[in-house]
Amino acid sequence: MSPTILLVHGAFADAASWSPVTQLLLDQGHTVRAVAGPNRSLTGDAEYLRSTVEQIEGPVLLVGHSYGGCVITVAGVAENVVGLVYAAGYALEVGESIASIESGFDKTSLQSNIVTESYPLPGGSDGTELLVKPEAFPDVFAEGVPAQTARVFAVSQRPFSTLCVTETASAAAWKTKPAWGIVSTRDRTINPEVERFGYERAGMRKVVELEAPHLVMHTHPVEVAALITEAVAELS
């Protein structure tokens, strides 16, 4: 049985960020879903994704971009998940967070172009969420995307809670599920060495390096879709 392909977005984005790849996969006849995650905490986001996965009948291939890689790493332990694909994403170890894995590598342009805002938490306290400076967004996050589209992305970005950065992974599904990875070698949001490090540690079946920026599914949708369909073929 061919798995359902479940696409998971990252920080500062939503499910529509997968649109170019979603269209290609649908045109090829695959069963696809692009889920909109809360981006409120790694634990909560993974629980939300796992709930979604477990309500899908049959096997599921999880595909995560950027922070979405963290979420599929944890939620991917769901019984009907049969594989994982990382696109310019984090493949965390148990007990590791985005903050801790990035601490061992050079910073990217992203860190100096972040602004913070507060949002209410249950109980009356405030949380902190992150946004990319709109004027920096096209170059730092959306390099390679047409300028008009990048400007729209910049003013419609989905805020990203600091809890997503600091909470640690409670599971690492790549230890028991086959995985594939894409490194964006021109990434200015995540250091490509962070991507390579996680993928090598996970012993992924195949890693593809693309001369691409962070939004690889916009700049190289054919190549991204090709790796996903290759994973589907191996798992079917």
Image (cartoon, rainbow, N blue to C red):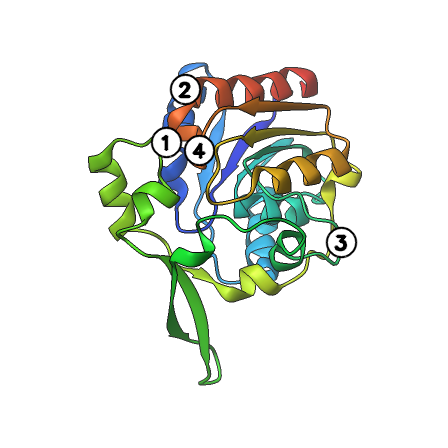
Q: Position of residue 171 (x, y in %)?
A: 74, 52
**Helix, strand or loop at disc 2?**
helix
**Label drawn at residue 19:** 1
Amino acid on which the number 1 mark rests in the picture: Ser
Location of mark 4 (residue): 213
Looking at the image, tell me whether mark 4 or mark 1 is earlier in sequence order: 1
Q: Considering depth in this image, is 2 or 195 the residue closer to the camera?
A: 195
**Label drawn at residue 231:** none
Q: Which is in the foreground here, disc 3 or disc 1?
A: 3
Residue sticking out furthest to the front: 106
Q: Is residue 160 left or right of residue 232?
A: left
From what the image shows, is residue 233 above or below residue 111? Answer: above
Cα–Cα span, label 4 and label 2: 20 Å
Q: Which is in the foreground here, disc 4 or disc 1?
A: 4
Amino acid on which the number 2 mark rests in the picture: Leu
Circles 3, 1 touching at the beta carbon (< 8 Å):
no
Amino acid on which the number 3 mark rests in the picture: Val
Q: Badge 4, how many Cα within 10 Å: few under 14, some, many 20+? A: many
Cα–Cα span, label 3 and label 1: 31 Å
**Label drawn at residue 24:** 2
Residue at image location 43% in from the left, 23% down from the top: 220
Location of mark 3 (residue): 94
| Corner quadrant of residue 115 | bottom left
Q: Which is in the foreground here, disc 2 or disc 3?
A: 3
**Helix, strand or loop at disc 4?**
loop
Cα–Cα span, label 4 and label 1: 17 Å
Q: Position of residue 62 (x, y in %)?
A: 59, 36
Looking at the image, tell me whether mark 4 or mark 2 is earlier in sequence order: 2
